[in-house]
Image (cartoon, rainbow, N blue to C red):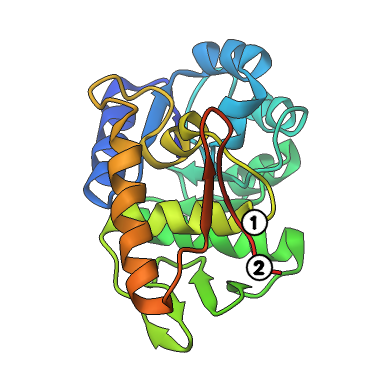
Amino acid sequence: MIVVVDDRQLVKDGYTALFGREGVPSAGFDSFEFGEWVNTAADSDLDAVEAFLIGQGELTLDLPRAIRDRSQAPVIAVSDTPSLESTLAFFDSGVDDVVRKPVHPREIMARAAAIRRRLKALSNHTDVGPIRVFSDGRDPELEGRIFALPRRERRILEYLVANRGRRVTKQQIFNAIYGIFDEDVEENVVESHISKLRKKLRKRLGFDPIDSKRFLGYLIDWK
């Protein structure tokens, strides 16, 4: 999920719509709402955030450090005024990157992925046995061959692999795939997506690498 912070309603609505077209869940706040939310949100909600996008607002330059107290997700500032002073002010406030408008959502996602790779010193892919998932939106691979998946199933596989060896709940997966503020989608839709994903994995691999336990959630690992 991408969290967009801007005091202008039109800007927030615009970005959330653009991310929605790319299949990326997002939520918009003004700077005052966000300041309260980031300090009180549950850890599981913050874990679902892939990046914070900071625009204009009265508290804009105070937010990056508030974010760092709760999350290590990339913080990217969007500058409306391409000036050295505004860019340096953003970096001084603690953001990871500054982009200038107009900027495409895919570029923001790519920059966020690059920041995560630098922070974790990882390559752009993660392997679990014969499964390889990428951080740049590409389809995963199974045993070196492309494994094309619908967007939701791909993101679920990416989330399971990112948390390999750790059991995650249906709610955690839902938050990561649909966002924590989407009230128009039932949480049980996750079960349908996972069922389809597991059937496809079983067909290609000859077995199901996803372990599920009732009430405890799902786990993918490779011994």
Residue 2 visible somewhere in the drawing: yes
Q: Where is residue 186? Give x, y as percent.
A: 27, 25
Whole-percent x and y of residue 120?
75, 61
Residue furthest to the bottom in view is 144
Q: Is residue 149 left or right of residue 26?
A: left
Q: Is residue 12 left or right of residue 209?
A: left
Give the left or right position of residue 54, taking residue 24 as reference: right
Of residues 52 and 157, which is closer to you in this image? 157
Residue drawn at 69 percent across, 54 percent down: 165
| Disc marking residue 56 | none
User: Which quarter shows the N terminus?
Assistant: top left
The residue closer to the viewer here, 188 or 83, is 188
For the residue marked with disc 1, what is the amino acid? Arg
**The C terminus lies in quadrant:** bottom right
The residue lying toward the viewer, choosing from 13 and 159, is 159
Give the answer, above or below, for where 171 lies relative to 152: above
Q: Nearer the viewer, mark 2 or mark 1?
A: 2
How many neighbours does mark 2 have within 10 angstroms: few (below 14), some (14-19), or many (20 or more)? Answer: few
Judging by the rendered image, the residue that carries numbered circle 1 is: 164
Spatial separation of the CA atoms under disc 2 and disc 1: 8 Å
Whether label 2 touches label 1, CB < 8 Å: yes
Picture residue at 57% right of the left edge, 59% below the top? 161
Residue 164 lies, in percent from the top left, at: 64, 56
Q: Residue at x 42, y 73 (%)?
A: 140
Q: Tell me where residue 200 sits by quadrant.
A: bottom left
Give the answer, above or below, for where 124 lies relative to 3. Answer: below
Q: Mark 2 highlights which residue? A: 222
- Counting residues from the start of the chain, the first of labels 2 and 1 encountered is 1
Specify the amino acid type for callout 2.
Trp
Tell me: 223 left or right of 197.
right
Q: Residues within 10 Å of mark 1 (few under 14, many from 20)?
A: some
